[in-house]
Amino acid sequence: MAFYRLRRPKTDNETTYLEGLWPWRIPDLACDVCGKKVGFEGVSYPAFDLSQLPNSGDYLGENRNNAQLPRVIQDLLARVRALIGTHLWIPPRTNFGQFSGHVEEPTKRLYDFAWAFSNPFLTEAALRRIEQAGVRGVKGFPALIAYRKRFTPTSPYLELQVEHEVSLADPLQPRLPNHPRFHSRCDVCGYNNGVPRDPLRIRSDTIPIAAHIMRCREYPICKIVSEEFALAIMRLKLSGVCLEMVESV
């Protein structure tokens, strides 16, 4: 079975860019060993409303922007897990709730896919077409998007909730070759500012059964989709997205 990396097109004006925020977030971890502020981009769960939590303000405003010590992070995670369970990965910088934002430059028109940072969004109409093509179980949740006057949306954007992980087959490599200082890692907190090797390879023994969309655990901004999902995107000629085949080993 083939797998594909789901990513923004490499040309800026070929997709829809969204700028905004999620209402709640786990703060970055202030590692007392390496001294880094540790957070993982690309992890969000739009389905979950944290307003039900006691002291939910701990996940808002400046509280979510200030890095916290491990004991504080553990307390925040424990409260979230009591609400949503233990089956989802919740690293520092995980976002929760309905995304709220606006269409950002250099967007030229509204595409089927949209992107907020590395998080994929899809119009409701496009997601229904994918379901009609036989791809079931892809979850999308409404986003609150403000549109500029020149944009007339025909279908609202839904944020795709990614609940599954897969592991890379190769360790991350330095961002700049021959410059080790650009690739530091901490075995205590998990900090690692490297990037995936090219070509991208994933471990076949970590691929979730029947999952159509997943993130790379070591590099969460990298999203992987199943062959069925990728073929549906290609057959339907959905816009605003790029697909690159990856190898499973």
Image (cartoon, grey):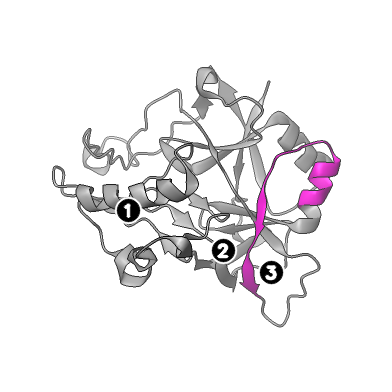
Q: Secondary structure at mark 2?
A: loop
Q: Which residue is mark 3?
A: 108
Answer with mark 3 or mark 2, whichever residue precedes in sequence.
2
Amino acid type, residue under disc 1 in the picture: Leu
Dot 2 or dot 1: first in sequence order is 1
Residue 63 to residue 234: above or below: below
Q: Gap between marks 2 and 1, in whole Å?
A: 19 Å
How far apart are the alpha carbons under marks 1 and 3? 40 Å
> Which quadrant of the figure has residue 24?
bottom left
Q: Position of residue 192 (x, y in %)?
A: 30, 39
Residue 98 circle label: 2
| Nearest to the observer: residue 136 or residue 86 | 86
Residue 6 located left or right of residue 59: right
Left or right relative to 141: residue 75 = left
Q: Which mark is nearer the camera, 3 or 2?
A: 2
Q: Residue 215 lies in magenta, yes or no?
A: no
